Image (cartoon, helix red, strand yellow):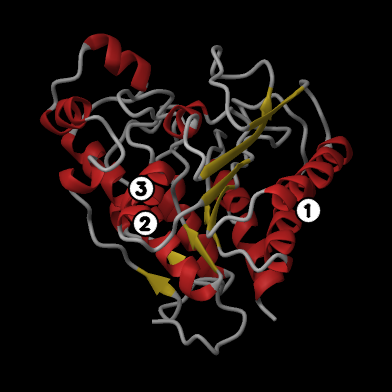
C-alpha cells in the first residue's frame, strides 16, 4: 500500500483480469493492458508500493447505473445479433469478467482520488456504453458506474467528466444529460464515431487534422471556464490517446508531446483548484502494440510530473 507521505508515486489501479483471451487481429488491442503495466514497471512509475488491486463488482453494483434487463442480457449471454454487432466485440464469459474488473478499477480509482488527490486506472474509459446498450467496444460504462456508486455511498454529490478521447462520449451524455449533479465535457473529432452524437453539457467538435497548438489553445480557453461555473467533488478524466496523429481510428493530428502537454495541463489545472481526479486511459488503436502501450503511459508520466512534488 502507498504511504501518503511518499513522493513521486501516484496510486495506480490494475488487475491482471483487465486482459483476457482475445483475437490478436481485432482492432481493440487487448494486449495493451499488460503491456502498459510492463512499461510503467520498467520506468518505475508502478511498484508494489503504489499498486492498488480492485475487488470485483457484481450485478447489484451495475444496477445502480444500468438498466436491469440489459445487465441480465449481458451477464447471461442473451444479447441479440444487433446488440452484438453494435458492441463490436466477440462475446465470451471471459470478456464480460474482464469488463467487470475494469469497471471495478475505475470505482477504486475514484475512491483513492478522494483520499490522495489523484489516482490512475491502468484501464477504463468505456464511454460509449449507454444505460441499456453496448456500443463501440464498450459494454458497461465504468465512469458512470463509479459515479453512481460513489453517490450511493455518499462519498460524493457532484462529479465532472473531462472526456478528451477522440470519440464523443455519447454514453456518458446518455447517463447524465438530465442530471445537474454531473457535468460532462467532451472534446472530440466532429466527423468521427459515433455518427449520431448525444448532446452533453459541453461538446466541442474538432475539425479533422487539428494539431497540437490549435487543440491546446481550445482546451486552455475552455477548462477554466468550466471550473469557474462548476465545482465538483470529484473529477474523472478520460485521457484517450486516439487524438494521436498515427492512431488508426483517430482523425486528429496530435503528437506524443502534444498529448503529454494536454494531460499535464489538465492535471495542473485541477490541482490548482484542489480538485481530486481519477484518470482512465480511454481509447488508443495501433497495430504496433508496444508503441500503443508506451503511448498510454503518457497520462501516468504527466501525473508523476504534476503530483510528484
Q: CA distance from mark 3 to mark 1?
A: 31 Å
The reply, left or right, for residue 308 in relation to residue 145 is right
Give the structural element (helix, strand or loop) at label 2. helix
Q: Nearer the viewer, residue 276 or 214?
A: 276
The reply, left or right, for residue 217 in relation to residue 41 is right
Q: Which residue is mark 1?
A: 261
**Which one is earlier in the sequence, the residue at label 1 or at label 2?**
2
Q: Identify the residue at horizontal 20%, vertical 13% (top origin).
A: 80
Q: For residue 65, which quarter of the picture? A: top left
The reply, left or right, for residue 188 in relation to residue 6 is right
Q: Which residue is mark 3?
A: 148
Could you tell me how many numbered marks the image carries? Answer: 3
Label of residue 150 in the image: 2
Q: Crowding at label 1, few (<14), some or many (≥20) Cα neighbours within 10 Å?
A: some
**Residue 246 to residue 265: above or below:** above
Tag 2 and tag 3, C-beta contact below 8 Å: yes
Residue farthest along the top direction in this orientation: 82
At which x and y percent is residue 37? 46, 60
Q: Nearer the viewer, residue 112 or 234?
A: 234
Q: For residue 201, which quarter of the picture? A: top right
- Quarter of the image with the N terminus is bottom left
- Quarter of the image with the C terminus is bottom right
Frontmost of labels 1 and 2 is: 2
Q: Identify the residue at horizontal 61%, vertical 27% (top origin).
A: 248
Label of residue 112 in the image: none
Q: Nearer the viewer, residue 250 or 265?
A: 265
**Which one is earlier in the sequence, the residue at label 3 or at label 1?**
3
Amino acid at each position: 500500500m502507498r504511504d501518503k507521505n511518499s513522493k513521486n508515486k501516484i496510486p495506480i489501479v490494475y488487475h491482471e483480469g483487465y486482459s483476457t483471451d482475445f483475437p490478436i487481429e481485432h482492432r481493440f488491442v487487448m494486449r495493451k493492458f499488460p503491456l502498459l503495466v510492463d512499461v510503467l514497471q520498467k520506468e518505475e512509475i508502478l511498484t508494489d508500493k503504489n499498486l492498488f488491486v480492485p475487488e470485483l463488482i457484481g450485478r447489484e453494483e451495475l444496477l445502480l447505473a444500468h438498466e436491469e434487463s440489459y445487465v441480465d442480457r449481458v451477464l447471461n449471454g442473451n444479447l441479440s445479433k444487433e446488440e452484438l454487432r453494435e458492441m463490436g466485440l466477440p462475446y465470451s464469459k471471459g470478456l464480460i469478467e474482464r469488463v467487470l474488473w475494469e469497471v471495478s478499477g475505475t470505482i477504486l480509482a475514484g475512491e483513492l482520488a478522494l483520499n490522495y488527490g489523484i489516482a490512475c486506472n491502468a484501464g477504463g474509459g468505456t464511454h460509449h456504453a449507454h444505460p441499456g446498450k453496448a456500443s463501440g467496444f464498450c459494454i458497461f460504462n465504468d465512469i458512470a458506474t463509479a459515479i453512481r456508486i460513489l453517490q450511493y455511498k455518499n462519498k460524493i454529490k457532484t462529479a465532472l467528466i473531462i472526456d478528451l478521447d477522440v470519440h464523443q462520449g455519447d454514453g456518458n451524455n446518455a447517463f447524465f444529460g438530465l442530471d445537474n449533479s454531473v457535468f460532462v465535457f467532451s472534446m472530440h473529432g466532429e466527423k468521427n464515431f459515433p455518427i449520431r452524437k448525444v448532446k452533453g453539457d459541453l461538446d466541442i467538435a474538432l475539425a479533422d487534422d487539428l494539431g497540437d497548438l490549435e487543440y491546446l489553445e481550445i482546451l486552455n480557453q475552455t477548462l477554466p471556464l468550466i471550473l469557474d461555473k462548476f465545482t465538483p467533488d470529484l473529477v474523472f478524466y478520460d485521457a484517450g490517446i486516439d487524438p494521436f496523429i498515427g492512431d488508426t481510428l483517430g482523425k486528429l493530428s496530435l503528437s506524443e508531446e502534444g498529448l503529454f502537454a494536454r494531460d499535464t495541463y489538465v492535471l495542473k489545472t485541477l490541482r490548482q483548484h484542489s480538485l481530486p481526479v481519477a484518470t482512465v486511459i480511454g481509447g488508443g488503436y495501433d497495430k504496433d502494440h508496444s508503441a500503443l502501450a508506451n503511448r498510454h503511459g503518457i497520462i501516468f508520466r504527466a501525473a508523476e510530473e504534476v503530483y510528484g512534488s
